[in-house]
C-alpha cells in the first residue's frame, strides 16, 4: 500500500549573486504524493492568512482550551498531574514575512507553571496550517530558567513546518517542526473517523496521529476532531491529557 506523504522541502535559497528570485509556492505537485515546497526567503505572504479555520485545527481569536491529565516525570518516573491552558491571543506576529496567529500555551505540573510558549501559525490558501515557530519560557520555582526548544522559521537553519494538512488521510506524513537539533517533531495520520469522549464532550469524525520527537525518542498519539481541534494526547505507558473545556 502506497503511503501519502507530505514532504516539506524547504530550502533556504539566497541567490543575490546571480540576481535570482525563484519562488515555489507550497502547493501539492502530485495527487498521490502531495508536496509542500517553498523557500523561506521566497514565501509570498499573500498566499497565507493569519486566520486559521482548518476544521481539524481551528484557532478562533479569543478562544481558550483547557486540558488536564497525567504524565510520568522523565527523570524520576513519578506521576505528575498536568494542566494545559491554551489561549488564542487577540494579536498577530510576523514571522518570515507572514502574519501569523499567536497561541499562548501554559503547562502546569502539580500546580506549578513549568513552561509558557507563544506559538505562531498561519494557514495557506489551500487550507494547510503551517507552523512558523515558538518563543519558549521554562520555569522553575516561578523563575524563568531557560528557553529550550525555541525557534522561528527563517532564523538559522529553521524552516516552517506543516502542522495540519488540508486533507488529513491515513498514511499522510508531515514534519511539524523543522529546527535541526532544536525541534524536529514529525507526525503521521494513522486513523480517521474516530470517536473520542473527553470531559469536554463526545466527538466523532476525528483523526488520530502518531507523533514522534526524534530528539528524545518520545512517541505520542493525538486526536483532532472537526470544529474543535486537539482533544486528547496519549503518551505511553499511561500518560494522557484530555480537553476539559473550550
Image (tube, rainbow, N blue to C red):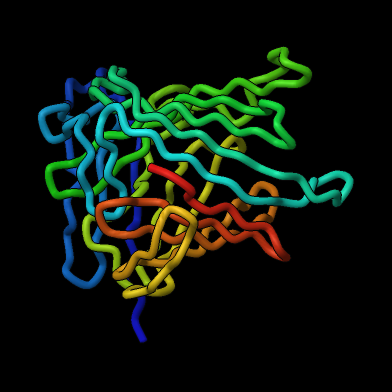
Q: In this view, does 225 lie above or below 72?
A: below
Q: Is residue 45 above or below residue 219?
A: above
Residue 33, x across and y down, in percent: 26, 67
- All told, the count of numbered labels is 0
Q: Is residue 69 left or right of residue 27?
A: right
Residue at 17% from the left image edge and 59% from the top image edge:
29
The residue positioned farthest toward the right in the image shown: 76
Quarter the C terminus occupies: top left
Residue 10 placement: quadrant: top left
Residue 105, x across and y down, in percent: 49, 31
Quarter the N terminus occupies: bottom left
Residue at 47% from the left image edge and 50% from the top image edge:
243
Residue at 27% from the left image edge and 44% from the top image edge:
58
Residue 64, x across and y down, in percent: 39, 34
Residue 212, x across and y down, in percent: 57, 57
Q: Is residue 120 left or right of residue 43?
A: right
The residue positioned farthest toward the bottom in the image shown: 1
Q: Nearer the viewer, residue 243 or 98?
A: 243
Q: Nearer the viewer, residue 182 or 119?
A: 119
The residue positioned farthest toward the top in the image shown: 143
Q: Is residue 191 above or below residue 209?
A: below
Residue at 25% from the left image edge and 35% from the top image edge:
60
Amino acid at each position: 500500500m502506497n503511503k501519502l506523504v507530505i514532504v516539506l522541502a524547504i530550502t533556504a535559497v539566497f541567490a543575490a549573486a546571480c540576481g535570482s528570485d525563484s519562488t515555489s509556492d507550497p502547493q501539492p505537485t502530485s495527487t498521490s504524493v502531495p508536496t509542500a515546497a517553498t523557500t523561506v526567503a521566497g514565501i509570498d505572504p499573500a498566499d497565507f492568512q493569519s486566520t486559521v479555520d482548518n476544521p481539524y485545527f481551528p484557532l478562533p481569536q479569543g478562544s481558550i482550551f483547557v486540558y488536564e491529565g497525567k504524565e510520568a516525570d522523565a527523570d524520576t518516573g513519578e506521576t505528575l498531574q498536568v494542566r494545559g491552558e491554551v489561549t488564542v491571543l487577540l494579536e498577530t506576529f510576523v514571522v518570515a514575512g507572514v502574519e501569523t496567529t499567536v497561541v499562548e500555551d501554559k503547562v502546569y505540573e502539580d500546580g506549578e507553571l513549568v513552561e509558557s510558549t507563544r506559538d505562531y501559525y498561519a494557514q495557506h490558501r489551500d487550507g494547510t496550517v503551517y507552523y512558523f515557530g515558538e518563543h519558549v519560557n521554562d520555569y522553575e520555582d516561578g523563575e524563568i530558567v531557560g528557553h529550550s526548544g525555541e525557534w522561528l522559521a527563517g532564523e538559522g537553519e529553521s524552516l516552517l513546518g506543516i502542522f495540519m494538512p488540508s486533507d488529513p488521510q491515513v498514511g499522510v506524513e508531515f514534519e511539524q517542526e523543522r529546527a535541526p537539533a532544536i525541534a524536529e517533531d514529525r507526525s503521521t495520520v494513522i486513523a480517521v473517523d474516530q470517536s473520542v469522549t473527553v470531559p469536554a464532550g463526545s466527538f466523532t469524525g476525528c483523526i488520530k496521529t502518531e507523533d514522534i520527537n526524534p530528539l528524545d525518542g518520545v512517541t505520542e498519539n493525538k486526536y483532532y476532531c472537526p470544529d474543535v481541534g486537539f482533544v486528547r494526547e496519549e503518551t505511553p505507558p499511561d500518560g494522557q491529557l484530555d480537553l476539559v473545556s473550550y
